[in-house]
Image (cartoon, rainbow, N blue to C red):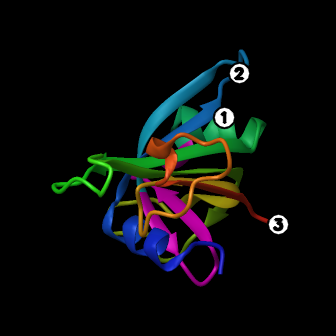
Amino acid sequence: MIFTDAESGYLAAHRLGRLATIGPDGAPQVHPVAIWLDGAGGTIDIGGPALAGSRKFRNVQADARVSLVVDDQASTPNALGQTGRGIEIRGRAEIVTLDPPLVAGFSGATIRIRPRRIIAWNIGELGPASPGRPPHMLGYQFRDVAG
């Protein structure tokens, strides 16, 4: 399993993220996107009504390195008094065609992200801080994913 149960639950409940791709001039470009978690496959799918004509699609075709952030503010602070929470997924994207598409009105063209590094903050239980880490980092977890 690539995502923890808490991460999977969070991603399944949040359909909006921000995808960072690398533009033609080498500069990062950030795009709001609709996301779907494929928990069994350990991937994130991104779709849209005319995705194949978008800059993010062309960017992924030219350079598959991407970063996706999904975050929000919790209504109740955690034990440290923090309300910000989220997940960043760094990885490689590929273009796939889905039939049927993710939702009605979307094209079949889909960007699929295969995680390589997962960084989550304040999702699930607070864990022990690494040695030398300040207390406010208790909710911050990261790991590399084989692939």
Q: Quadrant of residue 111?
A: bottom right
Rounded to the nearest angstrom, the CA distance separating label 1 from label 3 is 24 Å
Looking at this rendering, what residue extends furthest in the right direction?
147
Image coords of residue 131 (percent x, y): 68, 49
User: How many marks overall?
Assistant: 3
Instruction: Identify the residue position indicated by label 3 in the image.
Output: 146
- Image marks 2 and 1: residues in contact by CB distance under 8 Å: yes
Instruction: Identify the residue position indicated by label 2 in the image.
Output: 24
The local crowd at label 1, few if under 14, some if 14 to 19, many if 20 or more residues have their Cα within 10 Å, is many
Q: Who comes first in sequence, dot 2 or dot 1?
A: 2
Q: Who comes first in sequence, dot 1 or dot 3?
A: 1
Instruction: Identify the residue position indicated by label 1 in the image.
Output: 59
Give the residue displayed 52% in from the left and 37% down from the top: 54
Residue range corresponding to the magenta coloring: 35-52
Name the residue type under label 3: Ala
Q: Look at the image and tell me whether residue 20 can be seen.
A: yes
Q: Nearer the viewer, mark 1 or mark 3?
A: 3
Image coords of residue 60 (percent x, y): 68, 42
Q: Under tag 2, what secondary structure?
A: loop
In the picture, measured across the screen, residue 81 lies left or right of residue 20, that is left
Quadrant in which the C terminus appears: bottom right
Q: Look at the image and tell me whether residue 101 can be seen.
A: no
Image coords of residue 135 (percent x, y): 48, 45
Q: Under tag 3, what secondary structure?
A: loop
In the picture, measured across the screen, residue 103 lies left or right of residue 37, that is left
Choose between 92 and 7: the one closer to the eye. Answer: 7
Q: Quadrant of residue 123?
A: bottom left
Above or below residue 50? Residue 106 is below
In the picture, measured across the screen, residue 76 lies left or right of residue 46, that is left
The local crowd at label 2, few if under 14, some if 14 to 19, many if 20 or more residues have their Cα within 10 Å, is few
